[in-house]
Amino acid sequence: MNVFVTGASGWTAAPLLEALHLAGHSVIGFDLAPLSFAAPGLLAHHLGDIANFKSVRVAIEDASPEAVIHLAIAIGENDYLEPGRPFAVNVQGTYHVFEAARQAGVRKFVLISSAPVHLPQSGSGIRAAEASWESSPREDHLYDLTKRLQETIARDFSATFGLEVVVLRAGHIVDGQTDRDAKSRDLADLQYCRGGWVCRHDLAQACLLALGLDKPGYTAFHIIGASEARRYFDIDRTEKMLGLKFTNRFENYFP
Ligand SMILES: NC(=O)c1ccc[n+]([C@@H]2O[C@H](COP(=O)([O-])OP(=O)(O)OC[C@H]3O[C@@H](n4cnc5c(N)ncnc54)[C@H](O)[C@@H]3O)[C@@H](O)[C@H]2O)c1
């Protein structure tokens, strides 16, 4: 199928574009930045800002895709010092992508969300993928809140317009094949979110499975490979319902 991917130039999208190609899909990318890696089978790559509705609408209309995978997110160094950019890109931009997809008759939508934004602030126990939530009161609040609002938009488009939406709530994304993170740091030296990592290649496989999932309505899954995460998230459900087999559980990194 033809798949429209936002945030296609990002580190997280690189193995996804490769996996989509290997699975026989054609990709149309959309990003602020040009691609910095080889992407065989890419039909087109649109340079644009998801905060600009017209730019997204024209690109999706032109691509006429069967499915959309939405990864784009504000990542500028100072983007989270003020609310303007996170709301314009993460929230309004997400609305733009959903609305342009709806207008173009797209039926399948995969949203890359975040699992850590759903960690309970108090208490313990397993976090269910479709439970309600509270936000982090700390410095991550703006990122966390805008990621949660993306899920609200996704739920709304599914309930109101019948879009088939799969939300993939990823853990902290690293590369378990090279044992590096997005900044090329050795995982042995990385403490951030240890116990909550997911390999970007496993996330790419989760996207492929989400495209093939035959389930109407709104469905959310936690996508975290690290074994430790099973104490907090319903990973068994992800494996059973989505059929995902994590290739990297990062057991060597957790005592
Ligand atoms: N990085 C993580 O550990 C992590 C964890 C959980 C979820 N996620 C989610 O995964 C997705 C990918 O995020 P990432 O942090 O890996 O970043 P990334 O490295 O994949 O980069 C995001 C891409 O989005 C593009 N982009 C930014 N603003 C844009 C705009 N206005 N219009 C079009 N394109 C734009 C950037 O140019 C970049 O190529 C996001 O939805 C993010 O919330 C990331």
Image: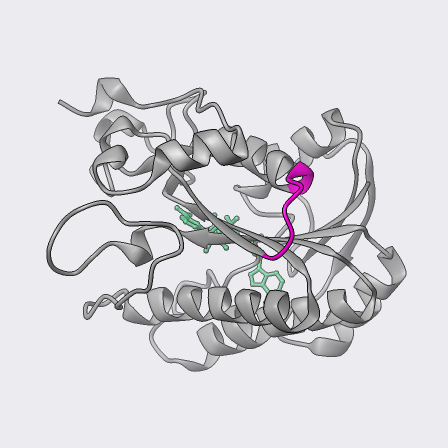
Q: Is residue 193 magenta?
A: no
Q: Residue at x 46, y 63 (%)?
A: 76
Q: Residue at x 77, y 57 (%)?
A: 46
Q: Residue at x 34, y 72 (%)?
A: 142
Q: Is residue 73 above or below residue 234?
A: below
Q: In which quadrant of the rendered image does the N terminus lie?
A: top right
State whether residue 10 appears in this view.
yes
State whether residue 181 appears in this view.
no
Q: Is residue 214 magenta?
A: yes
Q: Is residue 49 above or below residue 244?
A: below
User: In the image, residue 96 lies at what x, y percent?
Assistant: 66, 73
Q: In which quadrant of the rendered image does the C terminus lie?
A: top left
Nearest the viewer among 181 and 68 is 68
Residue numbers of the magenta segment: 211-217
User: In the image, residue 69 lies at what x, y percent?
Assistant: 64, 51
Q: Which color mode does the image show?
A: one colour
Q: Is residue 31 above or below residue 80?
A: above
Q: Quadrant of residue 254?
A: top left
- Please give left or right for residue 49 compared with residue 41 in the image: left
- Please give left or right for residue 39 compared with residue 75 in the image: right
Nearest the viewer among 238 and 146 is 238
Nearest the viewer among 182 and 241 is 241
The total number of labels drawn is: 0
User: In the image, residue 84 lies at what x, y percent?
Assistant: 45, 82
* Magenta span main SS: loop
